[in-house]
Every structure is written in structure tokens, then in C-alpha cells.
Amino acid sequence: MITPLLLGTFLIVVNMGIQVAAVVFMVGYVMRKTTRGTSKKGFAADTTLINVVLLVLLVGHLIQFAVWAGLFVYIGEFENFTTAFYHSIVNFSSLGYGDIVMGEEWRLLGALEACNGVLMFGLSGGTILAVMVHLFGRYDYSEN
């Protein structure tokens, strides 16, 4: 039990680094795009910016799925990366179909990956909210 716990905790820390890097990149990108004197405002510009944020955060999650899947293949729990990747997405998203399960020795990793996913999706949700608040804050909603 200690080996899966240590491996899972290590991967949670690695994945936190991946997602924090994506968030830091996105915050810098948004600030550069919105604080220049010539920054574009409006529905199309804001929608495009939010879509870029969503895309980068999704790529961060895809990398995290792959990191977990790589571990599952490395420890011999799955023979191919495709199955491991699918299983990883199901665990990470807390969907938990149960159509593919890990052996008793390693099943604690599934629960740890689900915890990791909850944390990382929360971080992404907070990032999206912060970006939207920043974008909305650029407008003057007072009546003239």
C-alpha cells in the first residue's frame, strides 16, 4: 500500500506543477493581451481569449492524463498506452465507469488520480473565473 501511495502522491505533485505552469502561462498571456493600450475589447475578442485559455488548460489536462497513463503502463498494469490513457481519463474525471479496473495491488492509484483530477479541474475552473472577472472589469457598466 505504501508504494502506490508514494507513487500517486508524487504524480499529484508533478501534475500540480504541469497545471500551475499552464495557469501561469495563461495569466501572463491574458495580461499581455488586455493591458496594452491597443487591447481589443468586445464579444469576439473576449470569446477568442477565453477559448485560448480553455484550450491551453485542456492541453495541460491531456498531459496529466498521459503522465498517469505512462505510470500505469510502466508498472505493468496495462499492456498498451491507449487503454491506460482511456482508464486515466475515466479516473481523472472521477467518471469511474468501472469497465476497466486495476489489480488490487495498484487500485489505490485510481482513487489518488481522481483526487488529483478534482484538484486540477478546480484550479482550471478558478483560472477561467479569474480571466472572466478580469475581462469584465475592463468595461464601464455605469449609466451615463
Image (cartoon, rainbow, N blue to C red):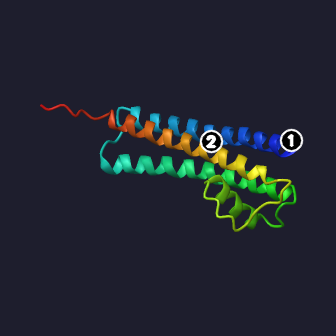
Please say if the residues under marks 2 and 1 sit with CB atoms less than 8 Å apart: no
As displayed, is residue 76 above or below residue 51? Answer: below
As displayed, is residue 4 above or below residue 81? Answer: above
- Residue 132 location (% of width, % of height): 39, 40
Q: Quadrant of the N terminus?
A: top right
Drawn side of residue 84 relative to residue 89, left or right: right
- Residue 11 location (% of width, % of height): 75, 43
Circle 2 residue: 19
Badge 1 local density, few (<14 within 10 Å), some, or many (20+)?
few
> Could you tell me how far apart the alpha carbons at marks 2 and 1 are, in whole angstroms?
26 Å
Please tell me whether mark 1 sits on a helix, a strand or a loop.
helix
Check disc 1 and give the amino acid type.
Ile
Hey, which quadrant is residue 99 in on the image?
A: bottom right
Drawn side of residue 105 relative to residue 17, left or right: right
Drawn side of residue 97 relative to residue 122, left or right: right
The residue sitting at 41% across, 51% down in the picture is: 48
- Residue 119 location (% of width, % of height): 61, 41
Seen from the viewer's position, the closer of residues 90 and 46 is 90
The residue sitting at 36% across, 47% down in the picture is: 45
Circle 1 residue: 2
Seen from the viewer's position, the closer of residues 90 and 107 is 107
The residue sitting at 66% across, 45% down in the picture is: 115
Seen from the viewer's position, the closer of residues 30 and 142 is 142
Badge 2 local density, few (<14 within 10 Å), some, or many (20+)?
many
The single residue placed furthest to the left in the displayed view is 144
Earlier residue among tags 2 and 1 = 1
Check disc 2 and give the amino acid type.
Gln
- Residue 131 location (% of width, % of height): 43, 38
Please tell me whether mark 2 sits on a helix, a strand or a loop.
helix
The label nearer to you, 2 versus 1, is 1
Seen from the viewer's position, the closer of residues 62 and 104 is 104
